[in-house]
Amino acid sequence: MQRFTSTKLFKVIIIAAMFSGLIFLNPAGIFNPTRSIFFSALVPFQKFFYSISVGINGTKEFISEIGQLKRENEDLRKNNQALLSENVMCSDMKNENANLREQLGVLPRDKYNLIPAFLVSQDPNGTGNWIEIDKGKDDGVAPNMPVIISKSVLIGRVQEVNAKSSKVMLLTNPKSIINVATIENNVKGIAKGEYGLGIILDMVLQADSINVGDNVVTSGVGGEIPRGLFIGTIQEIHRSDDSLFQQGVLTAPIQTSKLQMVFVIKSIK
């Protein structure tokens, strides 16, 4: 340490420090010219460091603005999704209301006491064997009640009843058998389901006259289902294997896969 303090470098450092101190302190303004030269030399460095400082602040503000824009875009995206969801719900409700008004306008309300119901599920196998509705025992629904849509079209009858829902066996269910008759010639027979694929008019005697285009309705025989509910139209006619009976393939007026609302016939007025 003593060697360093005795060196010329140490002496130069001490003198430079003293000189710098005198320049900054500037007693009696003696070093004004020197101070001016010194600070003038510092100006480029000050500009440089000031520019860096401004750039850093600007970068911080830019990053902050980007974050704000991201948050605003996310808020807008969520708002747009909410509005889209609301529009879809409104459109769905509008369609349901229009469908309800259309069906109510052509329902036989003067003949039957009806229970309106919406579908909540269908046969997951897509075979058209059954549907489930949102009305049950608490609403007055009971087993074997007929289920129709507008214009008195029969689609099935209630099979199982719970407190708040019911399962409806469709006419296309192979277990479904309904007594029917043709409108044109009052030819009697039965309508039975064909494994979810369609409806067959069966047990029609060979001597009876049925034709393609004849309309088939419930006959009222048996008393469970009222007379006159529409089933379908004869599309094809075939002889049975034993040649004692005729069969007709019926075309139903609606696809059950597109059903949204049905009506349970609670009683006849």
Image (cartoon, rainbow, N blue to C red):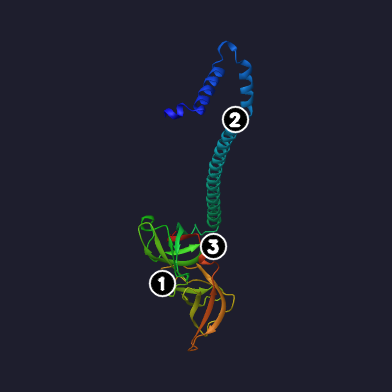
What's the CA distance linking mark 2 and mark 1? 101 Å
Taking the spot 51% from the left edge, 65% from the top edge, the residue there is 257
Badge 2 crowding class, 10 Å Cα cut-off, few under 14, some 14 to 19, many 20 or more, is: few
- Residue 145 vs residue 11: left or right? left
Question: What's the residue at 54%, 23% (across, down)?
Answer: 16
Q: Earlier in the sequence, mark 3 or mark 2?
A: 2
Residue 93 vs residue 150, the one in the foreground: 93
Residue 184 disc label: none
| In this view, 97 is above or below 30 | below
Distance of mark 1 from mark 3, alpha carbons?
Answer: 23 Å
From the image, tell me which residue sits under label 1: 222
- The kind of secondary structure element at disc 3 is helix
Q: Quadrant of the C terminus?
A: bottom left
> Residue 56 versus residue 68: which sits nearer the camera?
56
Q: Badge 3 local density, few (<14 within 10 Å), some, or many (20+)?
A: some
Q: Is residue 93 left or right of residue 130?
A: right
Q: For the point 54% across and 62% down, which residue is it? A: 151
Q: Which residue is mark 3?
A: 151
In the image: residue 131, left or right of residue 237: left
Residue type at numbered disc 1: Gly
Return the residue found at the far top. 28
Q: Identify which residue is drawn at 57% across, 32% down.
A: 53
